Amino acid sequence: MALPFLPGNSFNDPTKGKYHRSHSLGYRNGYALPTRPEVGIGGTPLPVNQLSESELDELANLKPSLTYGQAKQAPPEDFIPAHVAFDKKVLKFHAYFKQTVHESANEHYRIRPVNIFYYLEDDSISVVEPHVENSGMPQGKLIKRQRLPKNDQGDHWHWKDFNLGINVTFYGKIFRVIDCDQFSKQFMASEGIDLNEPEQVSSDPYIETRKEAASLRTYTTKSSFDKLKQFIDLDRKVLRFYCVWDDRDSMFGEIRPYTLQYYLVDDTVEVREVHGPNDGRDPFPLLLRRQKLPKDRYNVESSFPSVVMELSDHEIKDWYTPRDLSLGSTIYIFNRRFLIYDCDDFTKAYLNQKYGMTNFTPIDVKGENRAPTKSDLPPYNGFGSLEDSLQSCLSLIPQPPKKDFIKMLENDLKVLRFAATMDSVRPEDKGRRFIISYRLADDMMMIYEPPVRNSGIIGGKFLERTRVTKPGSVAENPDFYGPQDMFIGARIQVFNHRFIITDADDFVLHYLEARPSDFPGSERTAASIRELKMSQAGQPVRTPVKGAPLRVQRVPGDTQRLVEEVQAQLRKSNYLNHIDLRTAFLKHDGDRTGRIDAAGLKEICNKNNLPIDDDIIDALIANCDLNNEGLIDYEGFIRCLSWA
C-alpha cells in the first residue's frame, strides 16, 4: 500500500545519479519530437499511455479529501465584505447604570444615563455618557471602541444578544438597555428579532429629594441687587460700544478706533484695540485689561498716603455704569478722551429696556485726513537708469521697477534700426555715421558706430542700451524718445550729443504701417521713410490714399533693375527652391506650351512662399509679358530668380 508523501515516509533511490529535470521533447532537424528522458534527444517516442486499466480506475476513484482533508469552498461571486456592507452603520441603544455612593447620608446610588454604540462593521462597542453642565462628575467616553468580552469562554457581545429591557455586563458593570433609535429598530426587525417594549429611566432618589425640597422652600428676595442674583441673571451678558480716541492734538496723533466692552456680571470694563491691515502698530490686543473703571481716580481724600499706598476700591467714590455710556458721550479713561459713536444690537436693546434710551443714531467720526507730505525728488544724478534711481527715493529698501512682461514677450527680438550722423560743430565729427537701435521690448535705445579705417576714431558701441529722455523733461514725469520722434531729418539729443536721422530699415516702415495705433504720431516717421525710399529708387513720390495700405510702388520697364532687386531679396532670404518652383509650373502647364497665365504664376509663387514683395512680382510679371497676351514664359521667369 502506498505511503502518503509526508516527512519520514519518503525514500531516496541510491542508484540515481542524475538530478536534472527530465523533459519529453527534443529537437531534430528543427522539429520537436517526443523522447524518453533516459534515452535523450531523438530517442524512441514515448508510448501514449503507460498505465493499465486497473490503475486508471484506481486514479478515477481516488478521493484526495481522505488524505489531505476537505478543500475550502470558494466564496460566492456576490460576496461583499463586512467592512463594505456595514460601513458607517451603527446601532444606538439608550441605557443607564447605577453608581453606588459610599459615605453619603443623602444618597446611596445615583442614576447615570449612557449611550451604547454598536458598530456593525467590526462588531465593536463603545459606551458614551452625555455631558451634563455643572454636574460635577467627569463624563464623556466611558468605554472606548473595542470588542467587548461576553464570558470566560472567549465569546464577544454580538448584536443578536441585544434587546430592550435587558441587562448587559461590560467589564463587571451592569447596564440596563431601555430604548434604541429608529435605525436600530429597523435593523433588528429586518434580522427577525422582536424588540421588547421601551422602558423609562429609573428615578434618582437624590434628585427627587432635591426637587421636593425645592418645591417646599421659600425665598425672600433682598431689597438690593445682590451679587448672586447678578451672577445668575447677567452672566455672559456684555455691552459692546464702539469708540475712538482722538489724539490729533499731540504730535503724530490720529484717530484710533477701539472697542469698549462692559461686563454686566461684575461691572468691569475692557478696552480692545481695533487693528487694520498694514496699520503699522504692534499687535497688542488690549489697551486696558478687564477692571472696574473709575470716573475720576484722583478724587480721593487729601489725607490718603498716595506716596506709599495704591488706590483701592474703597478710595474710589464713583464708577462708570451703563447709564454713563450713551452714544455721543465722551468718557475719560485714565486721562484719555474717548468718544462713543455706536454700539451693537444687544446693547441697544438693554439700554432701551433698562434706562429707556431711544437715540441710537451712529455718529460719523471720520475726520479729515491729513494731507500727505509732499516729498521733493532730488535731481537725477546720471548713475544707472532713471527708474532705478527713482526707486531709492520711494522706499527705504529699493525694489526693482516693474516691467511689462506681456510687451516683452510680444516684441522679443524686434528692433527698429535708424542711420544717423552726429550734429557737431567740430569738423572731425562731421563724417561720423551711427546706427541707432530701438528695442520694442523695453523701449531702450542703443547707439553703435561702425569702425572706419584710418579715421582716427575707435568705433564700436557708443551708448549702452538705456531709455533716453527728451530735453527739458522732469524726473517726476519723464518724456522718452520713441519711434514717432525719429523721422528722417529729426534731431535727437542723447546726453548732450545731437544726432540727425538720415535713413531707416525697411522693417521700420513695414512695422509702423502695420501698427499705427501703437505709436501715436508715427505717421510722420513712416511718411518720411517712404519718401526717402522712393527717392532712392528714382520713383516719383505718391501720396497714399487715406485708409489704403501703404507700400512702395515700383514702375515696370527697367528689367535689369527689377532682376537685381529680386535677386537681392532672394539672396538675403537664401532662397534655393527653384526645382520645386519649376515642378509646380510644369504641373500647371498641362499642354507643355512653356507659358502660363499671370494669375496662375503669381498663385504658384505665393504657395511656394517666394520671399519677394507683391509689387516687385507684379512688375516682373509685366516685364516678362512681352506680347501683352497675359502668358508668361516661366523658364525665363525662373532665370530671373537665379541668384546663385
Image (cartoon, helix red, strand yellow):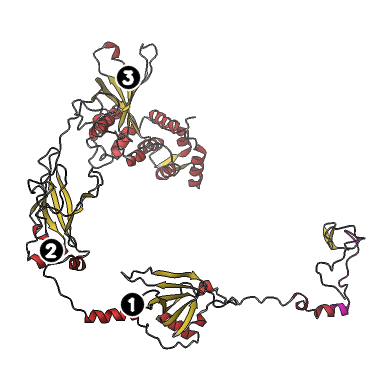
Where residue 521 sits: x, y (%)? 22, 35
Q: Residues within 10 Å of mark 2 (few under 14, many from 20)?
A: many
In space, the residues marked 2 and 3 are separated at their CA atoms by 84 Å
Residue pointed to by mark 2:
348
Q: Residues within 10 Å of mark 3 (few under 14, many from 20)?
A: some
Q: Residue at x 6, y 62 (%)?
A: 359
Q: Residues within 10 Å of mark 1 (few under 14, many from 20)?
A: few
Count of all numbered marks drawn on residues in the image: 3
In space, the residues marked 1 and 3 are separated at their CA atoms by 116 Å
Q: Are marks 1 and 3 in contact (CB under 8 Å)?
A: no
State which region is magenta.
36-56
Circle nearer the viewer, 2 or 3:
2
Give the dominant element type of the magenta stretch: helix, strand or loop.
Answer: loop
Asked which quadrant contains residue 432, the reply is top left
Circle 3: element type: strand
Asked which quadrant contains residue 448, the reply is top left
Where residue 79 sits: x, y (%)? 57, 76
Residue type (three-letter) at the residue carrying disc 2: Lys
Circle 2: element type: helix
Q: Which mark is residue 433?
A: 3
For residue 113, above or below residue 471: below
* Residue 248 counted in the magenta span: no
Residue 539 makes an appearance in the image: no
Residue pointed to by mark 1:
106
